[in-house]
Amino acid sequence: MSGQLQTVDDDGPERCAFCSAEAAGPCASCRRSVCGDCCTLTEGGARTWAICLDCDRKKGRSLGGAWRGLGIWLVGLLVALAAIVALMEWLAPS
């Protein structure tokens, strides 16, 4: 060791998962790195997100399914908490 900075093999820019070009960022759906040529922009919503071409073919450009999934998860959590509170009320001595 000479006391100098040492390079590591992966210090270069992140590469696209599809064409190995320099990546612009992650896919909003699957989180793989994509370049500007290998992504499309989402439709609808308050912000525009880039998704890879594979996710575009499989799921379409809308992220509505992800938002629905989050909503269902939150409602399920609230129902589970309500069931726990109801069980505690039922088991509590009067």
Image (tube, grey):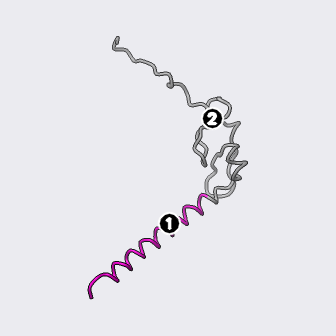
Vertical arrangement, residue 47 with respect to residue 2, above or below: below
**What residue would you read off at disc 1?**
74
Image coords of residue 47 (percent x, y): 61, 53
Residue at 33% x, 14% y is 3
* Secondary structure state at the residue bearing disc 2: loop
> What label sits on residue 17 in the rendered view?
2
Q: Earlier in the sequence, mark 2 or mark 1?
A: 2
| Quadrant in the picture for the C terminus | bottom left
| Amino acid marked by disc 1 | Leu
Residue 78 in magenta stretch: yes
Which residue in the rendered view is the most extreme toward the left?
A: 93
Residue at 31% x, 81% y is 91
> Which corner quadrant of the image does residue 36 belong to?
top right
| Amino acid marked by disc 2 | Ala
Image coords of residue 28 (percent x, y): 60, 47
Vertical arrangement, residue 14 with respect to residue 5, above or below: below
Image coords of residue 89 (percent x, y): 34, 82
The part of the chain drawn in magenta is: 66-94
In the image shown, does 40 or 78 lie closer to the viewer? 78
> Which corner quadrant of the image does residue 17 belong to?
top right
Residue at 50% x, 22% y is 9
> Which corner quadrant of the image does residue 7 belong to?
top left
